[in-house]
Image (cartoon, rainbow, N blue to C red):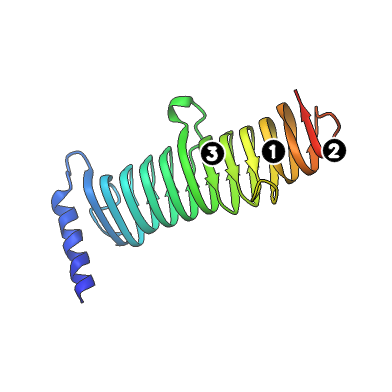
Amino acid sequence: MKKIVSMVCMMAAGMLLADAANNSTPVMVSLLTPVQAPSRAYDVTGFRLSLIYGECQEFTGLDISVIGNARKDSTGLTIGGFNFAGERLYGAQAGLFNWNDNATTSWDRRSVGAQVGILNYANSFCGLQDGFVNISGGSFMGLQSSLVNFADDVYGLQCGFYLIFGVNVASGSVRGCQIGLVNYANRMDRGCQIGIVNIISQNGWLPVLPILNGSF
């Protein structure tokens, strides 16, 4: 009973604090959208709590959600089971499943930050992906560390657990290093692969080499 009362009070506070003129609020509380205060049409600058599923437009601040969805930019720290950012991520997502759907490649709109979870997905991302499966649908700059790492173009490092126990795939080009049991790159612009099986389709020292392959 106390939990229900507390939640109702927080939702009421969210409604009172919301700035309807600017479609923004410092507090958002959600049970299961559309049962939330204020509505999904608002931006959040402050704190959001989603007990099952919550949705907003732009988000800035601290987000604690079982399933949290920011349909536009997400700036700050998001902690939960499933974390979604529809456009730019500028901060960190920590959860079981982290998703950043930003397809913009321009530097002023590129996502920057960290994703830490079981499965991490991002587009045009700069920073850290750390989990069991990391996927970047566009270019990736930084560090991917997991059992399976996949990206289009890689600028940086892909590595498996303890640097070796993993599979690294770059469907485009690599400028950096891949370290794992199996490493694949369509093209190595400048860098190397270290592992048991190292494959570079276009311009490696050889198409397949054990231990070390590369192009400089």
Q: Earlier in the sequence, mark 2 or mark 3?
A: 3
User: Taking 98 as reference, is 159 left or right?
Assistant: right
Sequence-wise, which precedes: disc 1 or disc 3?
A: 3
Kind of residue at badge 3? Asn
Q: Identify the residue shown where x is 70% and y is 47%.
A: 164
| Label 1–label 3 contact, CB within 8 A | no
Q: Earlier in the sequence, mark 2 or mark 1?
A: 1
The residue most toward the left is 16
> Which residue position holds label 2?
208
Q: Describe the element under mark 2 as helix, strand or loop.
A: strand
Looking at the picture, does residue 112 appear above or below residue 164?
Answer: above
Estimate how packed mark 3 is, as few (under 14), some (14 to 19) or many (20 or more) residues with alpha carbons within 10 Å.
many
- The span from disc 2 to disc 1 (Cα, nearest Å) is 14 Å
| Residue topped by disc 3 | 123
Q: Is residue 136 visible?
A: no
**Looking at the image, which is closer to me, 153 or 158?**
158
Residue at figure coordinates x 74%, y 36% from the top left: 193
**Residue 10 makes an appearance in the image:** yes
Q: Residue, x 64% and y 36% (percent of image)?
A: 152
Identify the image quadrant of the C terminus: top right
Assign a secondary structure to mark 3.
loop
Q: Is residue 28 left or right of residue 75?
A: left
Q: Which mark is residue 178?
A: 1
Q: Position of residue 30 (x, y in %)?
A: 29, 59
The residue carrying pointer 2 sits among few (fewer than 14), some (14 to 19) or many (20 or more) residues within 10 Å by Cα, namely some
Q: Residues within 10 Å of mark 1 (few under 14, many from 20)?
A: many
Please indicate whether residue 37 sits to the left or right of residue 145 in the image. left
